[in-house]
Image: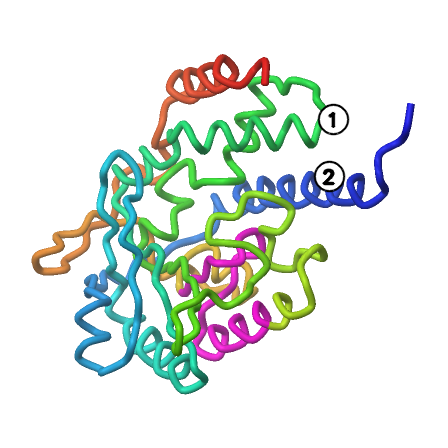
């Protein structure tokens, strides 16, 4: 029997290593301290218009027909505007794919059939065709999406999922894959992307970092500031100042979520989602 190509084995090993690292990261930051500052939310489109900067916004839904909510904590608006202006000056347009999510949005995002199907397909590839166990599926799910409000940087109003476009023609800057890429190209430092894509990721990350937005290592599009992920990754030792909140979007007032470590979806809901995926794709 012919052995697999070495690059296939390398890709598989890298993917498994990165997903396991993401699981460990989530477990580690679940106990990171938080001192919520109480800042309100502010709408990003209004801030861009007032500053006269060119910014694009996604028009797709999040999950279960939820429209995207382009809000960020007030203390981060200045960073957002400055980053957008600097991108414009170098011929780029910052595109916001996602920003603040309510806990209801996060709950249904974590239960999307497409997500379970991706996890199952990737695990079967990782396991060389073997069907994964429900426990393996559940562990991988925890690497892909925040399982509780405590782990959510989007529900904290402190994170942006971004794309970057060429200002002259609207095409995407090459970052090695599209937004929500779900392969070994997804981690920020993937060794399997082109030199040009690597330079673009590095340039974008450097620009974001100049204004305190920390890159999430396992998704090349995700940046945040002031939440548990950003403070932990930056090694500041400071408590996070942004936690998951309910928001009155009319006025922007925020209220911390009660019981932030309580899972957004029950074990029964997750098991049901896994079983449906196994039924849909189990013989694929």
Instruction: Provide residue 227's location: percent of width, then percent of height.
Output: 40, 58
The residue identified by callout 2 is 12
Q: Residue 243 — which label?
A: none
Quadrant of the image occupied by residue 24: top right
Question: In the image, 181: left or right of 184?
Answer: left
Query: Quick one: SS at disc 2?
Result: helix
Q: Determine if the magenta segment contains residue 203.
A: yes
Closer-to-camera residue (224/89): 89
Closer-to-camera residue (264/167): 167
The answer to whether 275 is drawn above or below residue 229 in the figure is above
Instruction: Provide residue 38's location: percent of width, then percent of height.
Output: 23, 61
Cβ atoms under marks 1 and 2 closer than 8 Å:
yes
Q: Earlier in the sequence, mark 1 or mark 2?
A: 2
Query: Quick one: SS at disc 1?
Result: loop
The residue identified by callout 1 is 128
Which stretch is magenta?
Answer: 200-225
Mark 1 packing: few (<14 Cα in 10 Å), some, or many (20+)?
few
Mark 2 packing: few (<14 Cα in 10 Å), some, or many (20+)?
some
Identify the residue at the far bottom of this view: 89
Q: Determine if the magenta segment contains residue 232.
A: no
Question: In the image, 155: left or right of 126?
Answer: left
Instruction: Provide residue 280's location: percent of width, then percent of height.
Output: 48, 16
- Residue drawn at (64%, 70%) of the image: 196
Quadrant of the image occupied by residue 257: top left
User: In the rendered picture of this protein, how many numbered marks are placed on residues?
Assistant: 2
Quadrant of image for the C terminus: top right
């Amino acid at each position: 029997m012919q052995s697999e190509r070495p690059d296939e084995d390398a890709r598989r090993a890298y993917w498994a290593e990165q997903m396991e690292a993401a699981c460990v990261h989530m477990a580690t930051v679940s106990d990171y301290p938080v001192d919520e500052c109480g800042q309100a939310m502010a709408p990003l489109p209004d801030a861009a218009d007032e500053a006269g900067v060119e910014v694009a916004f996604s028009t797709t839904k999040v999950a279960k027909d939820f429209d995207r909510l382009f809000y960020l904590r007030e203390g981060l608006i200045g960073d957002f505007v400055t980053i957008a202006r600097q991108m414009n000056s170098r011929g780029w347009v910052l595109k916001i794919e996602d920003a603040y999510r309510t806990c209801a949005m996060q709950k249904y995002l974590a239960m999307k059939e497409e997500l379970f199907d991706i996890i199952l397909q990737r695990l079967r590839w990782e396991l060389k065709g073997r069907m994964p166990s429900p426990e393996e599926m559940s562990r991988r799910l925890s690497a892909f999406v925040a399982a509780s409000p405590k782990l959510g940087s989007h529900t904290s109003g402190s994170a942006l999922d971004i794309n970057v476009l060429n200002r002259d023609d609207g095409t995407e800057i090459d970052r090695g894959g599209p937004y929500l890429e779900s392969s070994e190209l997804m981690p920020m430092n993937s060794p399997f992307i082109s030199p040009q894509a690597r330079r673009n990721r590095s340039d974008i990350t450097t620009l974001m970092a100049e204004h305190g937005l920390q890159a999430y290592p396992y998704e090349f599009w995700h940046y945040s500031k002031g939440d548990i992920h950003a403070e932990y990754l930056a090694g500041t030792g400071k408590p996070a100042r942004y936690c998951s909140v309910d928001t009155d979007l009319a006025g922007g007032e925020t209220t911390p979520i009660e019981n932030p470590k309580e899972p957004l979806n029950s074990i029964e809901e997750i098991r049901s989602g896994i079983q449906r995926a196994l039924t849909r794709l189990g013989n694929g």
